Amino acid sequence: MSEMPGLVLPAYFSYYKAPVKLVGTSDGRVRAWRLSKKTGGWEAADQLVEEILFAVGGEISRLTPDRFIQWTEHDRSRYLRGDGPVFALYETVRAIEEVATEERRPLTAEERALVHGIRRRTFVMFEEQLQRAGDPGADPSIAA
């Protein structure tokens, strides 16, 4: 598929509750990358490009880069387990959220800001690890 006039890339979406990003290629095409809940990396999903671009509401919605980062890190922390600094930070977020749940209250403004900042940090850390491992969909610069 050729790049569409008026389409600004990269673009970020929720596709049936999965983070998806559309990016341009050097030859003017549009590529889609969907978050893998098994690895936390990016799976090629080019077959979704037209459906996402021509969807009218429903289970497909456009996300801001920040919302995309938050959603991606929410899913990574929910579906992945491991060791190291990223997973320690996921545990920190989980602990903050569990306290609020146990106290039957929403997160405070300070807690929301802390969770938001931690997720931006883990996004960059995870994406940098993916880049080092050769994941072609990884892009830590989204959080810049």
Image: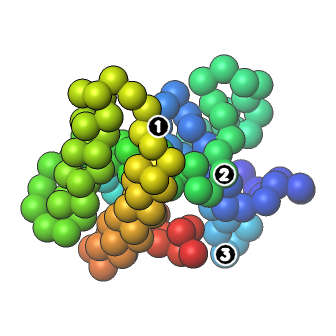
* Residue visible at 41% across and 58% down in the picture: 114
Could you tell whether 27 is left or right of 82 in the image?
A: right
- N-terminal-most mark, 2 or 3: 3
Query: Tag 2: residue type?
Result: Thr
Secondary structure of the residue carrying tag 1 is strand
Image disc number at residue 64:
2
Asked whether 106 or 28 is in front, the reply is 106
Residue 105 appears anywhere in the view: yes
Residue extending farthest to the right is: 5
Asked whether 27 or 76 is in front, the reply is 76
- N-terminal-most mark, 1 or 3: 1
Image disc number at residue 35:
none
Q: Which residue is mark 1?
A: 18
Question: Distance of mark 2 from mark 3, alpha carbons?
Answer: 23 Å
Query: Tag 1: residue type?
Result: Ala
Q: Is residue 11 above or below residue 105?
A: below
